Amino acid sequence: MSALRGEAFGRRPGAVAAPGVGTARDHRVAAVPEPIVTEYQRHRLVCPHCGETTCGELPPGVPQGQSGPRLMAFVGLLMAYYRQSKRRTAEFLETLLGQPCSAALAVKIQNEVTAAVRPSYEELAAQLPAQEQLSIDETPTKEANGKAWLWTFVARMFTVFAVRATREATALGALLGEAFHGIVHCDRAKMYWHLGCLQWCWAHLKRDFQAMIDSGTVQGKWLGCRLRRLTCELFEHWADYRAGKISRAALLRRMGPVRRKVECLLLRGTQSRDADVRGTCRELYEHRQWLWTYLRHEGVEPTRPTFGWCPAGERSLRHAVIWRKLSFGTQSASGSRFVETMLTVIETCRQQGRNVFAFLTNAVEAHLAHQVAPSLLSRV
């Protein structure tokens, strides 16, 4: 919250402004605002008849602790969005805001923020089986001393993160259920195969073809160079289509020769003497229908749904991966719930153009007042 305060300087009594010259020149100086502390005086009285002591109740929505909703939302963002440790968060509050804080209090606030936003998170997670398209990716992380996986599910207008102990298909089944029949953008990992309709990401395939070039074998380099060249041609045609330079019918005509050449090269690669090249080509050829899903279904892209040509699943994971490298994972299940919940809120607010701090503040206020949590589906 900011306010403007006006003061006039340098004007002599009776002076008249020169023609064409304003009466004042604005000069604004910004400063860090001091924290606002609200005191509630609770009267403690003794009954003259029975001698029982009673104390006034706090108004609805006032926290029992010393941290207000905006401060709690701010602490949550410091740890989640700005990747600060518990100790540095406590030091920041004491040094800059003059608020006494410890690492234990930061953990307590973290748990409160998680509880406040968790209903909004679960509401988004419940919408995953109904999505027509999802971009899914995963990255390894840690929980306490064990290995875990951070999953990301990117829909058109929201993103859901989930920390699970496994990378197997059972994690997908728990989140998507049997009701999901949409199209999945993913890499070639086998736990996605049971989902049925896939679109393998051509950005990942381009890396696979580059690996063939770097394999060191003559045939691998020959195949990799030609497949990579055809991939670049595919992206050129797709860029023309996205820019509106060609129609979808023209795109399908252009992609016909590209598809035939790619499949012929993959078939030839299945006979390669190089085991890695042979295995890659055989897998791609046997499941070649997942290379061209975007040609059969309008609205599907050859790569994961993109923001500026960057795969959405990978982009959504970048912040999470940097956070994991700085924190070395989480130390408990409650820490994992905080991570997946806050990452979901941060990325979804970015997708929807929302102010994440305002949303968190509203969520904490609703939680403290025992009201319904704000929804992240209102703009979907």
Image: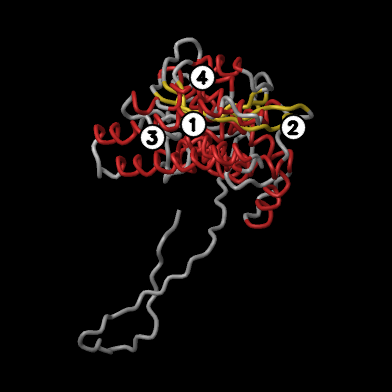
Compared to residue 255, the image places residue 333 above or below, namely above
- Pointer 3: residues within 10 angstroms few (<14), some, or many (20+)? some
Q: In front: mark 3 or mark 1?
A: 1
Instruction: Identify the mark nearer the N-term, 4 or 2.
Output: 4
Instruction: Identify the mark nearer the N-term, 1 or 4.
Output: 1
Tally the marks. 4
Give x and y (percent) for residue 286. 51, 19
Residue 139 appears in which quarter of the rendering?
top right
For the residues bearing labels 3 and 1, Cβ distance under 8 angstroms: no
**Residue type of the residue flagged with mark 1:** Leu
Q: Which mark is residue 331?
A: 2
Mark 4 to mark 2 CA distance (whole Å): 42 Å
Q: In front: mark 1 or mark 4?
A: 1
Image point 49% across, 40% down: which residue? 226
The answer to whether one can see residue 161 in this image is no
Instruction: Identify the mark nearer the N-term, 2 or 1.
Output: 1
**Residue annotated with mark 3:** 258
**Residue type of the residue flagged with mark 3:** Val
- Compared across the picture, whether 150 is left or right of 185 comes to right
Judged from the image, the secondary structure of the residue bearing numbered disc 4 is helix
For the residues bearing labels 2 and 1, Cβ distance under 8 angstroms: no
- Pointer 1: residues within 10 angstroms few (<14), some, or many (20+)? some
- Compared across the picture, whether 78 is left or right of 306 comes to right
- Compared across the picture, whether 157 is left or right of 220 comes to left
**Residue type of the residue flagged with mark 2:** Gln
Residue 140 appears in which quarter of the rendering?
top right
Q: In front: mark 2 or mark 1?
A: 1
Mark 3 to mark 1 CA distance (whole Å): 11 Å
**Residue annotated with mark 1:** 265
**Viewer-closest of 94 and 341:** 341
